[in-house]
Image (cartoon, rainbow, N blue to C red):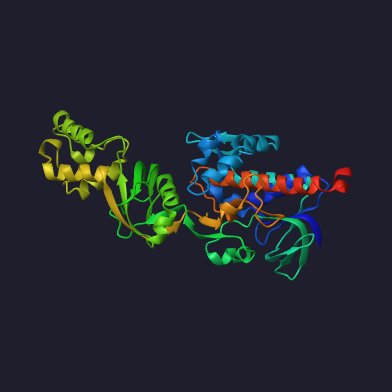
Amino acid sequence: MECDILVIGGGAAGYFAAIAAKRQAPALQVYLAEQGKPLEKVRISGGGRCNVTHHLADPVAFSKHYPRGERFLRKAFSRWGQPQTADWFAAEGVRLVAEADGRMFPHTNTSQTIVDCLQAAARRAGVHYLPQTKVNRLSPAPTGWEVLAGSGQALAARRVIVCTGGSPGQKGLQWLADLGLPIVSPVPSLFSFNIPQSPLAGLEGLSAPARVRIAGTRTEATGPLLITHWGVSGPAVLRLSAWEARHLHARNYQYQVRICWLAAHKDDSLMQYLEQQRNLHPRKLVHNSPIDPLPRRLWERLCTLATIPPGTVWAELPAKPRNRLLELLLRQDLSASGRTTYKEEFVTAGGVDLACIDPQTMESPLAGLHLAGEVLDIDGITGGFNFQAAWTTGWIAGTSAATALWSNDPLAQAL
């Protein structure tokens, strides 16, 4: 089987690359090969809603949300960024709606809309889909690339775009390393923290705004924190796990999590507030006086951890438990051991080294070989940033691959 462009991987980046290539040069034969379920990560993302992108439009501001790939994507976003993505989906009949925190979802509030949109666009463009096709080996050939699939099927392509996604280990990227591409060893990113014997056990499902960091580091993340059966999760934790992904991997996921439940306060201001409670509400029970925005049950648990008996009123609160409460509110330390994958999603830090990729074309040093999506050493925090990297790199790779063939093929131009 021969084609002009073969896209390997039927995820977000793969579909966008194939559609972009075919639209850029309709006369070219574009094939899309996928070994599993197409667009499965799109389908399950965002709890089945699909966080397509973020409302930030400025390329520089947008790129700051990537622990790996910021400088690389700054250039790429100048070619195709959030505004172009939103316009593209709108032209396909899918309006993206921004929520209060900036995340953008399809107006239908279901990921199936995005899946259907991409598959329909690929069909209309004339992309040939190759299901159940696993690529085992790529080999340079005089006219492009020879591709060997798992079934023994041989394909020939003038250009190849690799969009196989993140890999949990080096083994999954070995076929690319065998071509001579430099690989940054992958480690997990975007994960929840396991807290064995958590002092917050029994509060599962409670969420509160917090500032979180790993003890001994300066990196902080602020946002909702969710107490879970296994520890803590939520946007603040997931963002921190992304920024500290390599550091925590190096520590074998044994670390201290420091939580500030009242980020608007410092020691002096919180002490003043507690003293005001004593003066204004001397006969009120401390356990019945949660500080906004803490949920009542979380406040009661922190009071208990501070050894404040349930019947204690503010006027009778001794200095030592009051000081312990202050410390817990501003600096609660939890001993973490291990991590938990966030829902069914899996994001890795690592992949093909960006130093060898041209951000204007997504082409590697190997002529005719482009890469896009999470197979590259790019990962963002939660909020639609990982999908935007997929749309951007996929579009650039597909358009560039098609343009390179189109501009050098007088026959194709004539057609």
Where is the N terminus found, in terms of image quarters? bottom right
Q: Position of residue 359 (x, y in %)?
A: 62, 46
Please, is residue 155 above or below residue 297 in the view? below
Front in this rendered view, residue 215 or 35: 215
Please, is residue 90 above or below residue 146 in the view? above
Front in this rendered view, residue 39 or 367: 367
Q: Residue furthest top?
A: 280
Residue at image location 81% in from the left, 49% down from the top: 28
Q: Position of residue 237 (x, y in %)?
A: 40, 48
Q: Position of residue 117 (x, y in %)?
A: 69, 44
Residue 177, visible in the rendered structure: yes
Please, is residue 165 above or below residue 139 in the view? above
Q: Is residue 344 left or right of residue 238?
A: right
Residue 268 in which image quadrant: top left
Q: Position of residue 378 (x, y in %)?
A: 54, 50
Please, is residue 326 above or below residue 129 in the view? above
